[in-house]
Amino acid sequence: MTTHVSEKLPLQYASNSIPFKASDEARRTFMPPSDSFHPLTPDKMADFVFVTAASSGHFNEMVDAIASIQTLMPRKRIYFYDIGLKAEQVAKVKKLCFVTYQYFNLSRYPKFTSTLSTYAWKPFVIETALRKHAAVFWIDASFRLKGTNMSDAYQTARTNGGFVMFHKSNHSNFAVTHAGMYRYLATDVNAQKHIEQFGSGIMLIYRTDKVYRGILWWFVRCAEVIGCIAPVYNRYCKFADRWTQFAHCHRFDQSAINIILSNIWLRDNRMRYKADESFFRVIRSPTRMYRIKTCNDVVVRKV
């Protein structure tokens, strides 16, 4: 007989949230073997791979982002998940140095995941990659690396259990989160007005017990339910007060991960970390700031 997981997020502040329909067996099989967890010791913090995903519309931006990684961290492996590339774009990816092309089969997930504007695909891609690697550095197409000093990020990961966010947004999580999401990810909603939302476009995530049990489990469960991840489709915000008033928009995976982390970390922004502008920049177009490198060192896999 199938039973459903009914426990709430850690540090919940509401009792009326909707339980996710995941079996207890799913919870057990979701957790990796305990001996595969990443040791957050100083000598192991740099043991990560870069992970990204893109469809055809963001391909040129993504190549630009990859070029920045190739230039600044030239020995780091990059895993490119295809969520809708054209054939000629796939061919180009397969020629990029230190890039592993991986086709991501969206049909294995809820049907609405294929509507990429819900961003439901992102938690699934991240969890898939983290199951294969000890740590992943997620980067969206709109981010370019500018520096390599990650000592503060490593220290944050050792302090908080292995999940680092870099990019502050200058508005609260409340302002850009539709109320429908709180029905699934219960929290102190009023407190969300005082929590600055961090961007989900650049994150360093380690495979630890805390990350899997306390963060990814809920992130993936939310992505499986359209009422949680995408109660509305409107991403365009109309700000009045950027902190205490709802801007009539929704930030999908970004809102979800910020609720989850704020619950776990007692709404302490210091547990996330803010990189200065010397480390990365946000550019929402191709720039050719860096020269892309092609070679034959390519691995092709399907997931």
Image: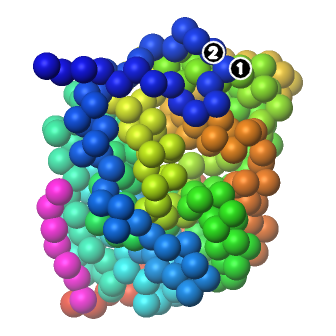
Q: Is residue 41 left or right of residue 291?
A: right
Residue 45 location, x and y as percent? 55, 78
Query: Is 181 located above or below residue 68 in the figure?
Result: above
Q: Is residue 57 visible?
A: no
Query: Is 91 located above or below residue 162 in the figure?
Result: below
* CA neighbours of label 1 inside 10 A, class few (<14), some (14 to 19), many (20+): some
Q: Nearer the viewer, residue 250 or 86?
A: 250
**What quarter of the picture does the C terminus occupy?**
bottom left
The amino acid beneath tag 2 is Ala
Residue 101 location, x and y as percent? 24, 69
Residue 299 location, x and y as percent? 20, 78
Q: Check if residue 302 falls in the magenta segment.
A: yes
Label 1: which secondary element: loop
Q: Residue at x 45, y 24 (%)?
A: 7
The range drawn in magenta is: 297-303
Residue 34's tag is none
**What quarter of the picture does the N terminus occupy?**
top left
* Residue picked out by circle 1: 189
Q: Residue at x 64, y 30 (%)?
A: 11
* Residue picked out by circle 2: 14
Q: Is residue 165 left or right of residue 70?
A: right
Indicate which disc, 1 or 2, sits on the residue closer to the N terminus.
Answer: 2
Quote the CA–CA distance across marks 1 and 2: 9 Å
Q: Main secondary structure of the magenta part?
A: strand
The image quarter containing residue 283 is bottom right
Q: Is residue 27 left or right of residue 40?
A: left
The amino acid beneath tag 1 is Val
Q: Nearer the viewer, residue 134 or 147?
A: 134
Q: Residue at x 52, y 82 (%)?
A: 44
Q: Check if residue 99 falls in the magenta segment.
A: no
* CA neighbours of label 2 inside 10 A, class few (<14), some (14 to 19), many (20+): some
